[in-house]
């Protein structure tokens, strides 16, 4: 008999329509499990909080990491499922993948249709997630997102559609496996970099902002981010990671003052590759920007925050194993 712990955090899978018509997360993990029996698997549940994932802060993400780690440390537990909103599931899944170094599966899932809709996808996704978490086939894959019968490696996976039943897509790739009728198939095993330490209370207050680059952009928003307390800024550069002369000048000054600047791209797929001068990626890197290569934009924000929360100055060598 395998044992799987389901940790509830809210999201659409736990949401029902309120009197004003808005969907609100209110159902606990035990409620979600009603009627979701899986043969030969003992299912336990616990609730951390019940929020739409658009409300989560670093503190909530840290608490999820701690809860998952606590459950995995129990000898009798074979895997963990986290129910979560799809809005920011990619970020929580990525953070968990960075800090989970063991073989037991950690699975995130949710729903695109609320729990009170007759055709809600929540129960099936949850049943599939539990099957994956208990599967010997999934051992060693680390953290995965399970949704609409597919398994995704969080490292390159983003929500690409707001309402579709299959909302996730992996840039420059696809799902790493499937789950059908309780049977897990893994076709591609993720390459897992060394696990980073769990975030501690310092992570809660580590502010890293994202500043977009667009025609004519100046450094006003980047300067405002630092003035508001940002320890790091991720640039959503154009194309392969380019900016303007004003942003380039700001990167030089920010790097000299100890602010960590990461270079990403606003493009949905493809890596950051320094190619261009005259304010482009070559100049930005020379000015001190860290290259995040194929790490998606908001994943890069979390990775930089996790590294900064250690209190060390973040170097390119620290980023490289995770790009």
Image (tube, rainbow, N blue to C red):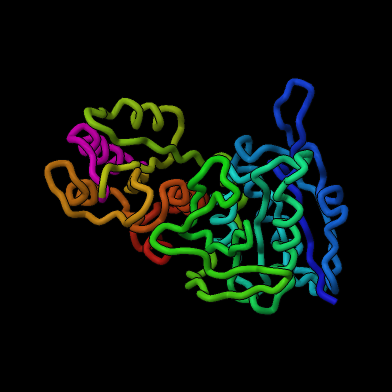
Relative image position of residue 265 (x, y in whole percent) = 33, 47
Residue sitting nearer the eye, 20 or 4:
20
- Screen quadrant of the C terminus: bottom left
- Position of 210 compared to 140: left or right? left
The residue drawn where x is 53% and y is 76% is 187
Relative image position of residue 274 (x, y in whole percent) = 21, 54
The residue drawn where x is 61% and y is 75% is 185
Answer with the quarter of the image where residue 20 lies.
top right
The residue drawn where x is 72% and y is 40% is 114
Answer with the quarter of the image where residue 250 lies.
top left
Q: Is residue 253 magenta?
A: yes
Q: Examine the rendered structure and indicate whether residue 218 appears above or below residue 75.
A: above
Residue lying furthest left = 278
Residue sitting nearer the eye, 273 or 158:
158
Q: Is residue 311 magenta?
A: no
Relative image position of residue 256 (x, y in whole percent) = 27, 42
- Position of 322 compared to 97: left or right? left
- Position of 248 compared to 29: left or right? left
- Screen quadrant of the N terminus: bottom right
Image: magenta residue range: 240-259
Answer with the quarter of the image where residue 195 lies.
bottom right
Q: Examine the rendered structure and indicate whether residue 316 appears above or below residue 159.
A: below
- Position of 50 compared to 178: left or right? right
Residue sitting nearer the eye, 244 or 206:
244
Visible in this render: residue 18? yes
Residue sitting nearer the eye, 60 or 14:
14
For the stretch drawn in magenta, the main secondary structure is helix
Residue lying furthest front = 119
The residue drawn where x is 47% and y is 53% is 303
Visible in this render: residue 72? no
Q: Examine the rendered structure and indicate whether residue 282 appears above or below residue 193.
A: above
């Amino acid at each position: 008999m395998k044992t799987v712990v389901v940790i509830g955090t809210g999201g659409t899978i736990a949401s029902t329509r309120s009197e004003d018509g808005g969907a609100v997360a209110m159902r606990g993990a035990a409620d979600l499990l009603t009627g979701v029996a899986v043969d030969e698997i003992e299912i336990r549940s616990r609730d951390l909080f019940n929020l739409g994932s658009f409300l989560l802060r670093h503190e909530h993400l840290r608490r999820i990491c701690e809860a998952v780690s606590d459950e995995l440390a129990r000898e009798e537990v074979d895997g963990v499922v986290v129910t979560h909103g799809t809005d920011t599931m990619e970020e929580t899944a990525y953070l968990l993948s960075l800090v989970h170094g063991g073989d037991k599966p950690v699975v995130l899932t949710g729903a695109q249709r609320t729990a009170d809709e007759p055709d809600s996808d929540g129960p099936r996704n949850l049943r599939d997630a539990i099957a994956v978490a208990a599967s010997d086939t999934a051992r060693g894959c680390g953290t995965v997102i399970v949704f609409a019968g597919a398994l995704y490696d969080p490292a390159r996976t983003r929500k690409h559609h707001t309402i579709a039943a299959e909302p996730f897509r992996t840039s420059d790739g696809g799902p790493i496996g499937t789950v059908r009728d309780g049977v897990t198939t893994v076709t591609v095993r993720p390459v897992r970099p060394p696990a980073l330490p769990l975030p501690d209370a310092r992570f809660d207050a580590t502010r890293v902002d994202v500043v977009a680059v667009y025609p004519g952009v100046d450094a006003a928003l980047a300067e405002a981010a630092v003035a508001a307390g940002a320890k790091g800024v991720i640039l959503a550069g154009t194309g392969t990671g380019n900016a303007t002369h004003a942003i380039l000048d700001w990167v030089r000054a920010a790097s000299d003052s100890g602010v960590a600047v990461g270079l990403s791209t606003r493009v949905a797929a493809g890596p950051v590759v320094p190619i261009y001068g005259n304010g482009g990626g070559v100049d930005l890197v020379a000015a001190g920007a860290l290259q995040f290569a194929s790490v998606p934009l908001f994943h890069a924000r979390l990775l930089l925050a996790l590294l900064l929360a250690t209190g060390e100055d973040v170097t390119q060598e620290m980023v490289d194993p995770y790009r």
